[in-house]
Amino acid sequence: MQPNEYVKSLAAKDVIRVEMVCLGNICRSPMAAAVLHNKTLGITKPRFIVTSSGTSGWHDGEGAHHLSEKTWKAAGYTFEHISRKFQLNFFDEADLILPMDLTNRAVILNGARNDADKAKVFMLRSFDPSLSHIDPTSPEVEHLQVPDPWGETIEAYQEVLEMIERATDGLVEALTS
Ligand code: 4NP
């Protein structure tokens, strides 16, 4: 996806609030928040506030999965995380709501109250420049998912980290240039 008018308009803001969303909020979305938070620490205009949540609420109050945290720490990112459930009032706070997979996206869009809410929702990987040819409204959108590493080995978490790094680099580029 090329950044649309809404995304481009965010670059003029003083503060951009980004909500990363997955299912459990212990593996993918905390890692995505950790990476984007660290990548944007030195940027003062716009300033980034990065949070995350899960559509399930199954792990509310827990820290990140140990393999997720181990993976982002090994890559040099520092971030504290407590799991929480995605709430519909997050549409009021967030400028961008970035699901990791299509199930997360469906739950979020199902809760959207109007077109302005829907306009804030993008697959995180739609910002990966190498995937910009994929139309998020086509069946090809399945290739924009961050696969769920829960129950997998550390290698799966490392692959997720690489996907997240490419996507967040593209996101920062889209919001600061
Ligand atoms: P996440 O991974 O959505 O990336 O945090 C999962 C974590 C926990 C579960 C599923 C996915 N679970 O079934 O508890």
Image (cartoon, rainbow, N blue to C red):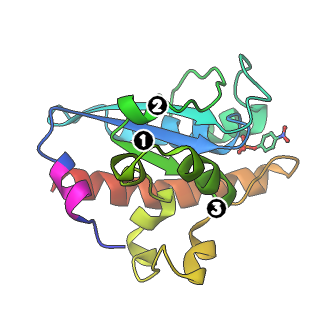
Residue 155 location (% of width, % of height): 76, 56
Tell me how far mark 2 sits from mark 1, CA to CA.
18 Å
Disc 1 marks a residue whose amino acid type is: Leu
Instruction: Check if mark 2's residue and mark 1's residue have beta carbons within 8 Å.
Output: no
Instruction: Name the image quarter holding residue 53.
Output: top right
Tell me how far mark 1 sits from mark 3, CA to CA.
21 Å
The residue to which callout 1 is attached is 36
The residue to which callout 3 is attached is 102
- For mark 1, give the secondary structure: helix
Task: Please state if 145 lies on the left or on the right of 43 as rendered.
Answer: right
> Of all residues shown, which one is farthest toward the left?
12
- Magenta: main secondary structure: helix
Tell me how far mark 3 sits from mark 2, CA to CA.
19 Å
The residue to which callout 2 is attached is 90
Residue at (76, 38) in percent of width and height:
67
Residue 39 location (% of width, % of height): 36, 41
Disc 2 marks a residue whose amino acid type is: Phe
